[in-house]
Amino acid sequence: MQLFIAFGHDGDGQNKVFAVVVTRITDLERLRQLEGIICTGTKRELWQDKMANMMEIFAKQAECDRICMLMRPGWSKVMKKYGWQPKHIEMVKEIKYG
């Protein structure tokens, strides 16, 4: 697993962490993919361009055939400008114990 961190400052001169992305590389039967499993942060406009570019650079260096990111639906508006297309939606069902 890999951890990517977006940090810098937003004009106040103090460095701070704005986002983190956790990825893993998975070797599937016919391809290798970089999977983004966690992405969270604030002030997205400060880091989204660099993070999207870094994910692609890293995937190429790791000889991945594809990048697959699990995202909330709202991210589809942002990622379209980087050439991403929605393919699937992850479905989740909460289970209550007891």
Image (cartoon, helix red, strand yellow):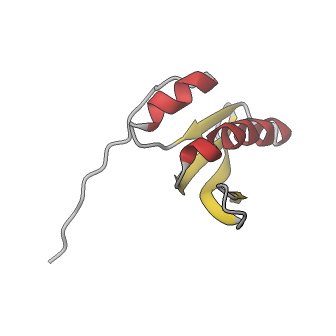
Residue farthest along the front direction in this orientation = 12
Point 41% across, 43% down: residue: 72
Residue 32 is situated, as x and y percent measured from the top left of the image, at 70, 38
Q: Looking at the picture, tell me which residue is in the foreground, 76 or 35.
A: 76
Q: Is residue 17 above or below residue 63?
A: below
Q: Is residue 26 left or right of residue 40?
A: right
Point 40% across, 37% down: residue: 74
Confirm whether residue 86 shows in the render: yes
Residue farthest along the right direction in this orientation = 61
Point 46% across, 42% down: residue: 71
Q: Is residue 58 left or right of residue 78?
A: right
Q: Is residue 39 above or below residue 74?
A: below
Confirm whether residue 5 shows in the render: no
Q: Residue 48 appears in which quarter of the rendering?
A: top right
Q: Is residue 12 left or right of residue 85?
A: right
Q: Residue 19 appears in which quarter of the rendering?
A: bottom right
Q: Is residue 77 above or below residue 98?
A: above
Residue 97 is situated, as x and y percent measured from the top left of the image, at 19, 73
Image quadrant where one finds the N terminus: bottom right
Q: Looking at the picture, tell me which residue is in the foreground, 73 or 41.
A: 41
Image quadrant where one finds the C terminus: bottom left
Point 61% across, 58% down: residue: 20
Residue farthest along the left direction in this orientation = 98
